[in-house]
Image (cartoon, rainbow, N blue to C red):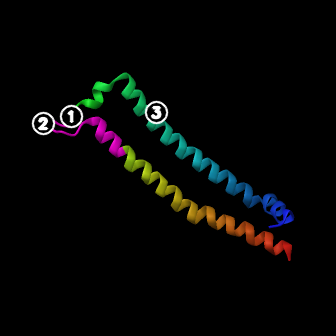
Amino acid sequence: MSSVMYQRMRANPKFQELVTKRSRFAWTLAAIVLTMFYGFVMVVAFNPTLLGQPVSEGSMLTIGVAVELFMFIFFWSLTAVYVKRANSEFDSLTQEIVKEAWKENK
């Protein structure tokens, strides 16, 4: 790809829209993950007995294991949400930007 085409793509207002949307979405997901992960680490550090309690009386499953399982599934779900949005909205915007740059090139 030539540098002229690259400059055309960067000058396209849709490119700025793509960068803004993708960055905002990625930072939101990152904040959610980091808050949950470090929140869990803080509970482990400052109140580990809470996580060692059983979920219900007589249960072998502890709160800590249940929370970690939930977080594992939740993080995979967030990844799936990102992939779905990236493959639909972000990819379609990218294709529009490239098509417009090719049209200007001809």
Within-10-Å neighbours for mark 2: few <14, some 14–19, many 20+: few
Residue designated by label 1:
54
Residue type indicated by callout 3:
Tyr
Residue 101 within the segment the image draws in magenta:
no
Question: Residue 64: horizontal and vertical position, in percent?
Answer: 30, 35
Q: What residue span does the magenta drawing correspond to?
A: 55-70
Q: Secondary structure at mark 3?
A: helix
Question: Residue 51: horizontal and vertical position, in percent?
Answer: 29, 31
Q: Residue at x 48, y 36 (%)?
A: 35
Residue type indicated by callout 2:
Gly
Q: Quadrant of the N terminus?
A: bottom right
Label 2 to label 1: alpha-carbon separation: 7 Å
Q: Secondary structure at mark 1?
A: loop
Residue 93 vs residue 30, the one in the foreground:
30
Residue designated by label 3:
38
Residue designated by label 2:
58
Label 2 to label 3: alpha-carbon separation: 29 Å
Residue 63 within the segment the image draws in magenta:
yes
